[in-house]
Amino acid sequence: MIKKKILLLGSFAVGKTSLVKRYVYSIFSEKYHTTIGVKIDQKDIKVDAANVRLIIWDIHGDDEFQKIHSSYLTGTSGFLLVIDCTRKETLAKAMELKAFIHKTVGEVPFVLVVNKIDLEEDYDIEEEDLKESVASGMKLTRTSAKTGEGVEEAFLALVKLLL
């Protein structure tokens, strides 16, 4: 079995924990729970002929009150960089985090995840902003932890980059 440590990173309240719960346990809760430090889950999947164990690190949101510890990044294979499509500032914070990760552990694969797509009427990120990210070579997926749309595909996109 191939083991891969993956991180979920982004600002506070972008839906990192909800994405993990939807992916690993097929559940969603409307209640907001702040992650303190890191929560670790795992999921075994089969991709093509490979059996893969994902060790998923759900790391607290990065903001002015708490910064991500570089010790959490040790041994990472890749990461999902999660933004909230209803809060434009989460895209800028994601780009800062990407630069920090690549500076700290090197150019590991990642996928930019645009979460909360079920909240169409509240979109705050312009399509042009996302096109710039894609044009720069980033893999981008769109998800809703609430409905489950795109969640499996987001994790699978990262795993395929890792393999």
Image: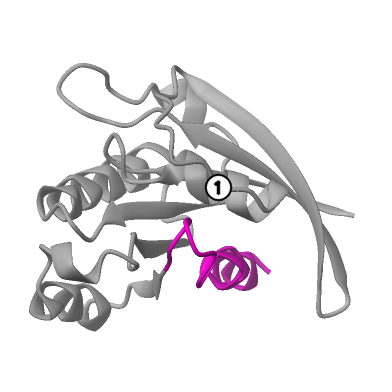
How many discs mark residues in the rendered view?
1
Q: Nearer the viewer, residue 19 or 11?
A: 19
Q: Does the segment drawn in magenta span residue 87?
A: no
Q: Position of residue 102 (x, y in %)?
A: 35, 48
Q: Position of residue 9 (x, y in %)?
A: 39, 42
Q: Position of residue 150 (x, y in %)?
A: 51, 72
Viewed as shown, does residue 6 lie left or right of 129?
right
Quarter of the picture containing the C terminus is bottom right
Viewed as shown, does residue 105 lie left or right of 85?
right
Tell me the residue at 88%/77% (across/down).
49
Q: Nearer the viewer, residue 161 or 83?
A: 83
Q: Position of residue 53 (x, y in %)?
A: 79, 51
Tell me the residue at 33%/72% (across/down).
138
* Residue type beneath disc 1: Phe
- Magenta segment: 143-163
Q: Secondary structure at mark 1?
A: loop
Q: Would you place residue 142 above or below residue 87 in this image?
A: below
Reading the image, the residue beneath label 1 is: 28
Tell me the residue at 50%/71% (across/down).
149
Q: Nearer the viewer, residue 48 or 86?
A: 86
Name the quadrant containing residue 70: top left
Q: Would you place residue 138 above or below residue 12 in this image?
A: below
What is the image's colouring?
A: one colour
Tell me the residue at 10%/49% (across/down).
89
Quarter of the picture containing the N terminus is bottom right
For mark 1, does the 10 Å Cα neighbourhood hold few (<14), some (14 to 19), or many (20 or more) residues? Answer: some
Q: Does the segment drawn in magenta span residue 147?
A: yes
